[in-house]
Image (cartoon, helix red, strand yellow):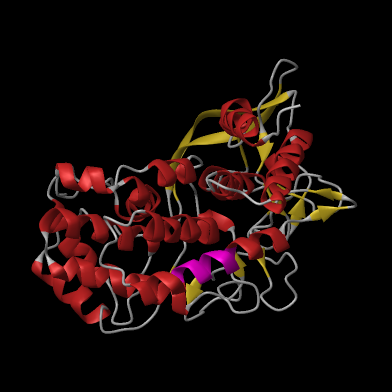
Amino acid sequence: MTTTHAFIAALLLMPTSAACAQAGAPPSLTGFEDAIHHWRNVHGDKYPRYAPDQVAQIADNILRYQRSDGGWIENQDPARILDDAEKARFDAEARKFGGSFDNRNIYTQMDYLATAYAITGDARYRDGSLEGIAFTLAHQIPSCGGWPHTVPATQSYHPHITIADDVTAGVLGTLRKVVTDTRRYAFVDTALRTRVHEAIAKGDACLLRLQVRQGDALAGWAGQYDATSLQPAQGRKFELPSITGQETVGVLRYLMSISDPSPDIVAAVQGGVAWLQRVEITGWRIETFDAPAEQFQYHSSAKDRRLVADPAATGLWARFYDVRDNSVVLATRDSVRVARYDDIPRERRTGYEWYGGWPASLLAKDYPQWKARHTPPN
């Protein structure tokens, strides 16, 4: 589940507004970058694709990928030109049910289709977007208001309330566009708009409820939460229960996008930012170096990575931190927590971002600007 760390910022600013649609500009494919990246990791990048301005062809692909209950499977390239055999395979797949919110999926398709409808007037795209909205609302988790990784569940972590890979924050960001971009989403009637408002309110409350507390201080968010206990839970075998340095940034960006935040939302943002500042790693940097080429199950690599001591280094964060003491959490595919980065096998070192600079721009630029807008004058 490698992520694009600036995705939430791109999502909230994505040029898919009514003005964009009226101008006839093609909707952005930014939201699909993670899916395309995963597709290419397995299949390579030597395949024909539609140009970004071939909106109808891309939207037709998205409809072809959509399942009968409105969901989509993850990690597909919507711009890929399909041959007849692939079209037949996806047509058969579309008769199934379910989908995955993983890797910015489902809400990205429904938003693209809304803009494709505004540009082309093809009612099929409107209907596909409405089906995506209906699927999204149907699978909001009742116990709290977040969204699961995948339905129906085929892995133990699929039913968890999922923060990882911008699942819940990404859904909420898009639902907010459904109710605020009233020209592009003019096809959403009053009854459905009311349901979307209700889902947003419940989802926002869920994010506030799930924010980890360390003593009296608010911290960040875990990648997954058990839907019953609402406690941090394990994702994949190497994703142990922990606070996530990366996805906390996505949640904060979403909360900061709310134009009239409540005092509780302001406190959540301030607490999350303070936690990110506390857990910044200094004196170390990640170094990538050449290594013998190797093909793994989900990716290939001719590089390796190591953690290097550098007294001048700043701006590094771990993907995962211990809920209790903020120590860095590293693990193998066997769910064994290890102490050192080089204890992780190369396949996971090169196929997963254990360290990164995800919060840097938020802390340096976005949060100060947000704070200036939402701090009462003396």
User: Magenta stretch containing residue 157, yes or no?
Assistant: no
For the C terminus, the quadrant is top right
User: Magenta stretch containing residue 200, yes or no?
Assistant: yes
Picture coordinates of residue 300 (x, y %)? Answer: 42, 46
Residue 110 drawn above or below residue 151: above
Residue 34 drawn above or below residue 107: above
In which quarter of the view is residue 297 placed?
bottom left
Q: Can I make out residue 4 in this image?
A: no
* Residue beneath the point at 62% across and 33% down: 367
* Residue beneath the point at 26% across and 78% down: 93
Say left or right for 227 vs 61: right
| Front in this rendered view, residue 43 or 143 | 143
Say left or right for 321 vs 355: right
Picture coordinates of residue 83 (x, y %)? Answer: 11, 64
In which quarter of the view is residue 120 placed?
bottom left
* Residue beneath the point at 54% across and 61% down: 168
* Residue beneath the point at 69% across and 34% down: 375
Say left or right for 221 vs 133: right
| Front in this rendered view, residue 205 or 186 | 186
Count of picture labels:
0
Residue ranking furthest to the front: 378
Picture coordinates of residue 65 (x, y %)? Answer: 25, 69
| Front in this rendered view, residue 305 or 225 | 225
What segment is highlighted magenta in the picture?
196-203
Magenta stretch, main secondary structure class: helix
Picture coordinates of residue 33 (x, y %)? Answer: 36, 47
Q: Can I make out residue 196 in this image?
A: yes
Residue ranking furthest to the right: 215
